[in-house]
Image (tube, grey):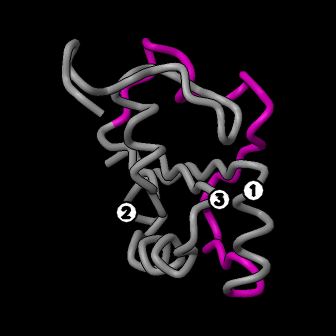
Amino acid sequence: MRFVIGITGASGAIYAQRLLDRLDPQEHEVHVVMTKFAHQVVAEEIGELKLREGVHHHRDATMNVPFVSGSAIFDCMVIVPCSMGTVGRIVYGGCFPQGETKVDPRPEGDAI
């Protein structure tokens, strides 16, 4: 299978490491991309991310990666750790600066 593993800056870097420990790059094509804050959280929580030989590690500020193209078929994308804020941005197609909210997920007319 072909995997994309997106590692975010949410607390829980150990979950990303556990997943990567279980994906064998000899059996699967594994691509990893980390957010800017993920590097900081990984350093604080587990020291460093250990990638097995054969895992493709990509910078987060490049479009020169195979999973950016809609014609490149991947079997699975895992976002780990994944906060509810990240889930919301995925659902609503937004990418907002931290603390800025553009989307109200409540149906129109719902009370606060």
Q: Is residue 112 left or right of residue 53?
A: left
First reached walking from the N terminus: tag 1 or tag 3: 3
Image coords of residue 102 (percent x, y): 54, 20
Above or below, comparing residue 94 to residue 86 in the picture: above
The kind of residue on which mark 1 rests is Phe
First reached walking from the N terminus: tag 2 or tag 1: 2
Q: CA distance from mark 1 to mark 3?
A: 4 Å
Secondary structure under badge 1?
A: helix
Q: Observer-nearest residue: 90 or 97?
A: 97
Image coords of residue 9 (percent x, y): 65, 59
Q: Is residue 59 left or right of residue 54?
A: right
Image coords of residue 91 (percent x, y): 34, 28
Residue topped by disc 1: 37
Mark linked to residue 27 = 2
Q: Residue at x 69, y 76 (%)?
A: 49
Q: CA distance from mark 2 to mark 1?
A: 30 Å
Principal SS element in the magenta part? loop
Q: Is residue 60 left or right of residue 78?
A: right
Which quarter of the picture shows residue 104?
top left
Mark linked to residue 9 = 3
